[in-house]
Amino acid sequence: MGADFIPEDFDINKWRLFKKFNNREERNARHIDAWFFDQPNMPKEEWERRLQYNKERLIKDTLEQIANSGLFEDEE
Amino acid sequence: MSEAIKVLFRVTDRCNLNCRYCFAREYSQGKDAPKELVLKTADMVKGAEHVIWIWHGAEPTVCGVDFYKQMNEELRERGISDISMQSNGVVLWHRDWLDFLKQDKMNISISYDGRCQDVMRGHKVDVERSIGALAEAHIGFGVITVIGEHNVKDLCGLYDDMKTAGVKYWQFNTIFPSPRSSFIPTNMARDYQHSVFELFCKWAEDPEPISIRNFEEFIPYMVGAGHYFCTFSGSCHEEYISVTTDGDIAVCDRWFDHYAGNINDFSSIDEVFSSPWRLQMAEAKRQRIERCKQLGCPFTDLCQGGCPRNALDSGDINMPSKEDCYERASFIAGVVKGVERYEPSNISNPILASIYARYGIRNTRMVGRIGV
């Protein structure tokens, strides 16, 4: 028997990303340098700048953390 | 001494129903457990940090309400206060039962199959009358529905049935193999996956939902919080004991063989958990997990090699059950597809919204769209 019980339309890489990103312990331990959006009356330009920074930084950091986390070793 | 123990006490072999998928009927000897056996078991487990005592059968209510008035008092005198009963619900609408349950506060779980009740179990009118009476008397209860080939495509219909009947807490379990029934066929796995996904969507968009344990416990579990059903923990041999009417000790109510021994053979619960059969089960679990890893299954850490009973019924306790794998993969894939579809902003269900908030759930689209 192989792992043929996994549905064909199930994206395993996406699942690993989902699990990695949402994992409770990982999330508690993870530090990502990002802006919060909790200040009222922020100028629109600053809002845009921070949003762009977060988008780039969080994706980059998340992918780096996944690459360095031993995720695939964990689940091999 | 073990910290938390779940005792599935099979208080009787008798039952007032004859369900088409029953896994116990063929093994029934028509016997009740003597009170001395209840007390002996309670004395053995009472030192544990926490004991969850579940009156099980066949059908426990056939022993009569007076039996439980006395026995629950005995359990509480021994510090065992987390007491439940798994019942078919046929007689719970009777006045003596309602009065007792209202006063006793014992947790009740009813087996009820909604639109399939009469075909698969019988006594639909009585069971729905019990559900209505319990709700009216403000007695808390949950419902468990068996999912098999007969209803695997209609989880949404069953959800409607539960709401109509007045059920507030619902759980669905896939069918267990037995002399009378088989696993959901592997060629229906996709039907199950689709049905789980449809139910998830229906539930996510329901502003007045009922509680669905399968989702509410599984979503946190898959991100590393809490625990899920025993069949996913892989540790039943470490926390469950099931005592038969003869005092034989099995792992759960599905075992009619492979006993650790008789309760008279042991002087402590620790001896039960360290008995040769329990250690063999631990080794079998290790081997199943090893096999799952070799297969490259991405869900190994969630299902922990699956249910040992299902593995044994599939031919080898050391190997994961193929049917089990199909069922679990389908369930997980159905839930994940649902979770991927919703973000906190488009969930109408307040229960699900609070789970997303509490556990910080983000779907993979959100992961790539920061600042939301």
Image (cartoon, rainbow, N blue to C red):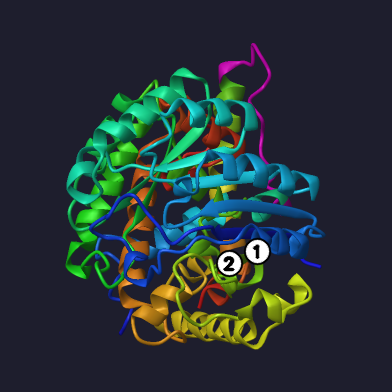
Left or right side of A33 for B93: left
Residue B337 image point, x, y percent: 34, 49
Kindly identify which chain the residue marked by label 2 belongs to.
B
Are the residues tagged 1 and 2 within 8 Å (C-beta)?
Answer: yes
- Residue sitting nearer the eye, B201 or B365: B201
Q: Position of residue B311 (x, y in %)?
A: 41, 79
User: B328 and A4: which one is in front?
Assistant: B328
Q: Which residue is mark 2?
A: B243
Q: Is residue B35 above or below residue A43?
A: below
Q: Is residue A45 left or right of residue B149?
A: right
> N-terminal of the two: label 1 or label 2?
1
Quadrant position of the N terminus of chain B in the picture: bottom right
What segment carries the magenta color? A29-44
Q: Is residue B239 above or below residue B319?
A: above
| Residue for point 46% across, 37% down | B142
Closer-to-camera residue (B116/B292)? B116
* Number of numbered tags placed on the structure image: 2
Q: Name the mark nearer the viewer: 1 or 2.
A: 1
- Left or right of B241 in this view: B331: left
